Image: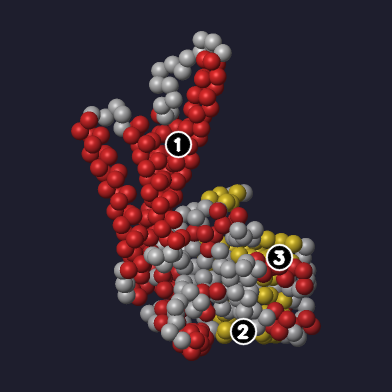
C-alpha cells in the first residue's frame, strides 16, 4: 500500500494543499508581531508534518484487536484535517481566480491608456475570503472532533406504516430494525449495553437485523456476544449478512481460512439466538393469517460491492402470501431489482450506508455526501405500494464518530 503510486499521489496532494493553505494562513498573520508570526508558522508546519508522518507510518503500526479504534481515530483526525484544509483551499482559490481576472483586466485597460489602477494591495489575497475559508475549514474539523462523542448516542426513530393488504391479525405488529453493528469498532461495552437496553425497552414483537455484524472477522463478536444475546422478541430475531461479514476486506492466508471465518460467523448468529436467513424465507402465522419474511445475502448494484444474494431462490414459495417483508443489506438492491422484478414485496429493510455518519438532518430536510452515491440513503422511501426503510446503522466504521446522523434503532409499527 505504502509503495503504491496511489499512496504517493495522496501524499503529494496533501503537501500541495498544505503549501497552498499556508499562503492564506500567512495573510491572517500579517497583523501579528514578528515573533508571534514565527510561532504560528512553526505550529502550522509542525501539525502538518506530524500528520503526514503519521499517515506514512500508520500502515506499519501493528495494533491489537482492542486497540484498532486508536488507529481509526488517528486516521480520522488526519483525514479530517486534510478535508478541512481542502475546503479552505476552495475559498482561497476563488479569491485567487477573482484577483487573477482582475489583474488581467487591469493590464488590458492599462494597455488601452485607461486610468484604472489596482489601488492598495493590488492582487494580494483578500483577507475576508482567507478568514471565511479558514473558519469554515476549522468548523468542519471541529465538528469531526465533536462527532467522536456521538458514536454511542443511539436514537430511536418511530415509523408507522399502513398497508391495505396487511392481514388483520398482523395489524399493530411492532418491529425493531437494526443494522450495521460493526462490533469490531466498539471500545465501550457499557455504552453498547445501553443501546441494547433501548432496543428491549421498546418491547418489539419481532427484531430484524440487516447485516454487517462485524467489520471483517468473526472473533470481533467475542466480547459482545453476551450483550447482543439479550436481544430477544416473542416472534424471534432474524438476521442477514452484509458486505463486511464475508471477510472480503482481509488478506487471508488461504481460501479455506476465509471460508472457515464465514462459517464461524454464521455460528455466532445462532449463538446469539438469531435466525440467519441465507437466501430463504420463513412464514409467520397468526390465527389463519400468514405473512412472509424474506432474507437474502448481500446484493448490491454498486460494482465495488458483492452480489452473493439470490433473490429468486429466497422468494420462491413466498409469492402465495399476501404480505412480504424483505431484509436486504444494500439499499441499491431496491431500485435495481425489487421495484422492477418483485413488485409484491411490500417492505424492504436495509442499512449499509450509515448515512455516511456525517450530514444534516432537521425536520423537512436531510443531506449527506453519501446521497451522491446512494439515492436511498436514510429513512423511509415509497414507490407505489412498496416501501423501503434504510437504517442509519447501530455502529460505526472508519470514522469513529457521528456528525448530524446519529446511530439508529428503528421502531416500526405495521397498520
> Residue sitting at 43 percent across and 56 percent down?
10
Q: Is residue 355 left or right of residue 184?
A: right
Figure check: 352 above or below 42: below
Q: Nearer the viewer, residue 155 or 69?
A: 69
Q: Which badge, 3 or 1, is on the more N-terminal residue? A: 1
* Total count of labels: 3
Question: How many angstroms separate mark 2 from mark 1 (CA)?
Answer: 52 Å
> Residue sitting at 37 percent across and 43 percent down?
19
Q: Is residue 309 visible?
A: yes
Q: Determine the secondary structure under disc 1.
A: helix
Residue designated by label 2? 278
Residue designated by label 1? 92
Rate crowding at label 3 as few (under 14), some (14 to 19) or many (20 or more) other CA atoms within 10 Å: some
Mark 3 vs mark 1: give the one in front.
Answer: 1
- Measured from the top left, where is residue 196 in percent x and y? 46, 73
Residue designated by label 3? 335
Amino acid at each position: 500500500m505504502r509503495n503504491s503510486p496511489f499512496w504517493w499521489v495522496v501524499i503529494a496532494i496533501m503537501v500541495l494543499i498544505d503549501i497552498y493553505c499556508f499562503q492564506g494562513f500567512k495573510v491572517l498573520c500579517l497583523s501579528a508581531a514578528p515573533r508571534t508570526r514565527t510561532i504560528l508558522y512553526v505550529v502550522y508546519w509542525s501539525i502538518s508534518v506530524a500528520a503526514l508522518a503519521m499517515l506514512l507510518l500508520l500502515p506499519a503500526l501493528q495494533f491489537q484487536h482492542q486497540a484498532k479504534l486508536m488507529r481509526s481515530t488517528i486516521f480520522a483526525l488526519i483525514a479530517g484535517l486534510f478535508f478541512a484544509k481542502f475546503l479552505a483551499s476552495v475559498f482561497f482559490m476563488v479569491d485567487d481566480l477573482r484577483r487573477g481576472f482582475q489583474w488581467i483586466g487591469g493590464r488590458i485597460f492599462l494597455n488601452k491608456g485607461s486610468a484604472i489602477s489596482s489601488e492598495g494591495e493590488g492582487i494580494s489575497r483578500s483577507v475576508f475570503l482567507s478568514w471565511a475559508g479558514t473558519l469554515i475549514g476549522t468548523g468542519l474539523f471541529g465538528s469531526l472532533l465533536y462527532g467522536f462523542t456521538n458514536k454511542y448516542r443511539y436514537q430511536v426513530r418511530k415509523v408507522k406504516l399502513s398497508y391495505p393488504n396487511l392481514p388483520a391479525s398482523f395489524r399493530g405488529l411492532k418491529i425493531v430494525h437494526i443494522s450495521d453493528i460493526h462490533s469490531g469498532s466498539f471500545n465501550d461495552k457499557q455504552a453498547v449495553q445501553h443501546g441494547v437496553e433501548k432496543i428491549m425497552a421498546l418491547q418489539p414483537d419481532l427484531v430484524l437485523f440487516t447485516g454487517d455484524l462485524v467489520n471483517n472477522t468473526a472473533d470481533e463478536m467475542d466480547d459482545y456476544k453476551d450483550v447482543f444475546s439479550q436481544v430477544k422478541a416473542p416472534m424471534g430475531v432474524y438476521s442477514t449478512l452484509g458486505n463486511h461479514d464475508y471477510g472480503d476486506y482481509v488478506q487471508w492466508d488461504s481460501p479455506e481460512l476465509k471460508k472457515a471465518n464465514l462459517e464461524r460467523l454464521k455460528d455466532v448468529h445462532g449463538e446469539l439466538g438469531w435466525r440467519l436467513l441465507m437466501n430463504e424465507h420463513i412464514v409467520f402465522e397468526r390465527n389463519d393469517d400468514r405473512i412472509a419474511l424474506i432474507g437474502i445475502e448481500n446484493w448490491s448494484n454498486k460494482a465495488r460491492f458483492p452480489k452473493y444474494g439470490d433473490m429468486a431462490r429466497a422468494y420462491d414459495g413466498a409469492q402465495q402470501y399476501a404480505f412480504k417483508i424483505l431484509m436486504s443489506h444494500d439499499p441499491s438492491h431496491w431500485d435495481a431489482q425489487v421495484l422492477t422484478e418483485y413488485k409484491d414485496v411490500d417492505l424492504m429493510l436495509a442499512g449499509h450506508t450509515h448515512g455516511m455518519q456525517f450530514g444534516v438532518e432537521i425536520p423537512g430536510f436531510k443531506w449527506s455526501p453519501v446521497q451522491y452515491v446512494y439515492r436511498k440513503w436514510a429513512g423511509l422511501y415509497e414507490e407505489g405500494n412498496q416501501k423501503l426503510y434504510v437504517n442509519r446503522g447501530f455502529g460505526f466504521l472508519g470514522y469513529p464518530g457521528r456528525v448530524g446522523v446519529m446511530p439508529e434503532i428503528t421502531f416500526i409499527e405495521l397498520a
